[in-house]
Image (cartoon, helix red, strand yellow):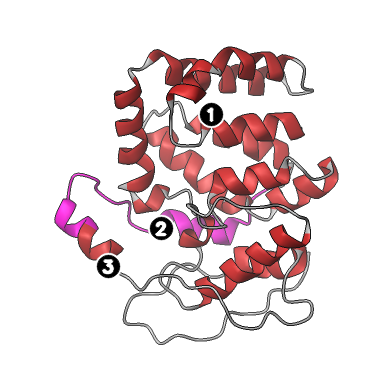
Amino acid sequence: MNRALKVVSLLLSYPTAEIQAAVPQLKAALGEEAVSERDKKLLERLADDIAALDLYDAQERYVFLFDRTRSLSLHLFEHVHGESRDRGQAMVDLMAMYEADGFVIDAKELPDYLPMFLEYLSTKPAAEARELLGQTAHIIAALRQRLKKRRSAYAGAFAVLESAARASPDKGLLRDLLETEDDNPDDLEALDRIWEEEAVTFGGNVGENACGPDRLRRQIRAARRKPDNAEQTPPAQMPNR
C-alpha cells in the first residue's frame, strides 16, 4: 500500500519532465505492490496518459483542473474550511503532526496539499495510513465523481485512494460537498473574485492534544465552507468513530 500511495502522490503532482521520464519506474513499482489488478490498471492508464502528452499540455491541463477549478482543489481543507479562520488552525495541526513524525514539508506547498499528505501517509504503517486516509473519504469521493463527470483520467487515482482507504464516505458530508456549485474555469473574473481571500497564516500555541489523528478527524470532517458573509463560529467537536 505504501508504495502505491507514493505513486499516486507523484501522479497527482504538477507534471514535470522528471515525472514523465519516471513513468516506467512508477509502473514497475506498482507491479511489486499488493494492489488489485483494477487499481493497477487505473494508475497505469493515468501514468501513460501523463507521459503521452506534450509536457506543456500536461501542465496546462493540470492547472485547468486543479488550480483554476476550486471545487477540484487538491488542498483538502479548502473543501471543509474554505475561507474560514478555522483553516489556519487546521493547517497548524496538520503541520504539527508532520513535524512530530519527522516529516519535513516543502516550503512551497501548504500542509493540506493532497500529494504531500499522501507522501506522508506512505511513510506510515499501512493500518495507520489507511485510517488517516479514511478520514478524507468524503473529499476523495467528491473529487472522483467530479473528475469522472469530466471524463478525466485523474478520476482513476481517486478511485484507487477510495479503495485503499477501505472506508465508506459519510453520505451527509459527501452530499454537502457535491451540492457546492462547480466552478467554471473559463470565467476568469469569477475566479478572481473566488480566490480573493485572506492568506492562511500559521502560528499561535498548539496546546496538548491539539494535533494528531483525533484532532485531524474533527478538522477533516468539518461542515462545508461557510458563505463569505456568514458569521464565523467555532468548529463543531465531532465524536470519534
Check disc 1 and give the amino acid type: Gly
Question: Circles 2 and 1: CB distance less than 8 Å?
Answer: no
Q: Which residue is mark 2?
A: 179
Residue under pointer 1: 156
Asked if residue 221 shows in the view, the reply is no
Residues at discs 1 and 3 in contact (Cβ within 8 Å):
no
On-image quarter of the N terminus = top right
Alpha-carbon span between mark 2 and mark 3: 22 Å
Q: Earlier in the sequence, mark 2 or mark 3?
A: 2
Q: In the image, is 108 to the left or to the right of 230? A: right
Please name the residue shown 70% across and 19% down the image.
Answer: 29
Tell me: 43 left or right of 163. left
Instruction: State the residue in front, 95 or 155.
Output: 95
Stretch in magenta: 168-191
Q: Is residue 60 left or right of residue 38?
A: left
User: Marks 2 and 1: which is nearer the front?
Assistant: 1
Residue located 66% across and 52% down the image: 104
From the image, tell me which residue sits under label 3. 196
x then y, percent, for residue 205: 65, 83
- Residue 116 in magenta stretch: no
**N-terminal-most mark, 2 or 1:** 1
Q: SS for tag 3?
A: loop
The image quadrant of residue 30 is top right
Q: From this view, report whether residue 190 is shown above or below residue 210.
A: above
Membership of 170 in magenta stretch: yes
- Which percent across, then down, holds residue 70? 36, 53
Residue positioned 68% across, 79% down in the render: 206
In the rendered structure, find residue 68 and report the number of the disc placed on it: none
